[in-house]
Amino acid sequence: MTKQAVLSLTLWLVCLSSSLSAQPLQSASARVPQDLKKLSIEELAQIDVTSVSRRSERLSETAAAVSVINPDQIFRSGLTTLPEVLRLADAIDVARVNSSTWATSVRGFTTNPANKLLVLIDGRSVYSPLTSGTFWDTEDMVLNDVDRIEVIRGPGGAVWGPNAVNGVVNVITKNAASTLGDYVSVGSGSDEHIFAVGRHGGRMRGGAYRVYGKYRQHGEQVFTDTGADAGDPVQLGQAGFRMDSSSDGPVTWVLESNAHRGTDGFSDRPDGDVAGGHVLGRWNRTFSDSSALQAQFYYDGNYRQVPSQFTEKRHTFDLDLQQRLKRGRHDVVFGGEMRFSRGNDIGVAGFDFDPEVRTNSLLSVMAQDEIAVRPNRVFLTVGSRFDRNDFTGFEVQPTIRARWAIDARQTAWGAVSRSVRLPTRLDTDLQLIDPATKQVTLTGSEDFKAEEVVAYEAGYRIRPVPPLSLDVATFVNRYDRLRSAEATLAPQPMIVLENLLNARTSGIEVAGTAQLRPVWRLHASYSYLHKQLSFDPGSHDVFRGTVEGNDPPFLLSVQSWLDLPRHTALDALFRRVDTRPDPVVPAYSELDVRFGWVVRPRWDISVVGQNLLHPHHSELLPANAPQYDFRRGVFARSRWYF
């Protein structure tokens, strides 16, 4: 999307806000955020999720390892960006590379980019067909408008398609009817130099709408080796709208759009430029309590310039249809998807993509059936997705899941699934050229195959007493045809990207929530990962698997929410990350703390301290590139509801 198009869309949003602002508003009391501790632990377990099977089901009844981040957790964390907020989920590895780059994954393979986690925002995939993974610098949003974030640990390819190898993150925003009125939030501090959010919501004929804008300027970090300023600040501005029809009646629809523009700072080159936007529409028709149809379409356009690497212009179109039918003991979801993505990728300074322009298509059908083997007690889910893509042809991603409701307080489940990661342009089209000799030193391969995992999972949930809940999940994963960097001498010395690396991983994830006092709640999670890499015969991988193997053996996090007298609160997030092996990042612990004060029913103030245990620390150090540490920071934030 061009800069002119971004500016035009922003101006149009302002005009839309003016034209709709005369609509009546909901009462102010309905706009006050819900307090997390008003929900009991049992009620939290009954929250509906949709990401596991593409239909609504209770969190406690899912046959998968799932955690949900709710709006009050987001607010009380004091965090300001989406990748930071993901740290609130169980057993997820979130590591910063520099001010604009994050590596996020579950169950291992936290590389840059982390290519085995599929991220969706309101059903729109933000997985990059260029490099794989997610460009988190542009996936910013008004966090106050997030309804929930569902994080699935484990393969999701049978439901969501390729690239959901280790997990799925599904960010679901609020219906416009729940964000009526005016909302403003501003903040500033040592690291978060400035961020400002404004939103207006109102009613329109047959539904509701909201328009919003956000601007954020984040400060530079420090070099790992010297502690000097790294000169990598980032800034991003965005604007958007959402319109929802009334929920009354059998037909509902959603229309939303967003545009953004910003710059990414780099310590060793000029600033990069990012811009883009999307339009998404969704239509639902409910025929009965046991039958519903959904159609969704989105367009996504993005521009990204990284000096000394590449410039990309990408356009993506996606159409998805889904039908649910419930008959007797069978609850069936089936549908299909068509996606077309065209990328114009221009390499610079030794980077090259051949061909320069490539259009990729993905055609899919899926079906899944949950069978009540023993009603209200034992359920079996069988399903698969069938995909046709331009890189590897035909792919099948099946799953079989079983769930046993032992009683009202206990659930056990197990699953076997296969998922794949499709090649991207980084795997097939990239060439690195030595500027002096003009010789190709690294190249992708048109024969690059899909990476695959076969995963075996099991889990157990229990609420032994009302103030306590426990959730345990275990897994054993077998990966084949992972990306390797093979040294070859013919026809000239170079590195060729191939699929000669394999892996076996296993682990356990434990999470628990305890209501220690009516005003104090704790949530803790711990995960352990064991990984073993191997190579096919004849492999000459120049990195010997260090890129894919750079994961900490364990992660620990503890969240605390404490209500204090006089409408104040003290909330904290502690995290412990074990050592990363290569490049070595020593184990570290960090602590974020928020002190909040509700001055009036529609006005609150927060003071947030981040990374308080050290002046600065490393999280993920790329090889052969500038390496950064992330500083201790303090900022203040104020929110108003009108």
Image (cartoon, rainbow, N blue to C red):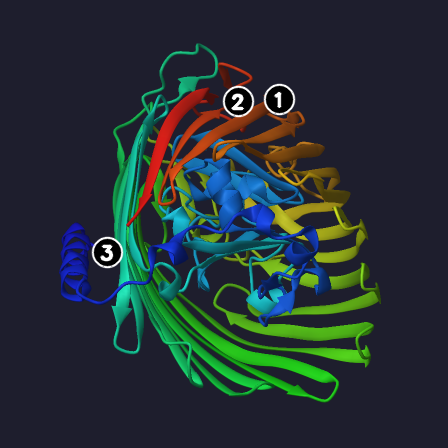
**Vertical relation: 394 (above or below) 220:** below
Question: Which residue was labeled with disc 2?
Answer: 618
Question: Which residue was labeled with disc 3?
Answer: 1
Residue 109: image location, x then y, percent: 62, 42
Where disc 2 sits, the SS reads loop
The three-letter code of the residue at mark 3 reads Met
**Vertical relation: 559 (above or below) 386:** above
Nearer the observer, 367 or 463? 463
**Vertical relation: 5 (above or below) 544:** below
Q: In this view, does 345 lie to the left or right of 162?
A: left
Q: Is residue 119 visible?
A: no
Residue 254: image location, x then y, percent: 36, 71
Sequence-wise, the earlier of marks 1 and 2 is: 1
Per the model, the C-alpha gap separating discs 2 and 3 is 35 Å
Where disc 3 sits, the SS reads loop
Q: In which quarter of the image is residue 159?
A: bottom right
Residue 539: image location, x then y, percent: 67, 42
Question: Which residue was labeled with disc 1?
Answer: 588
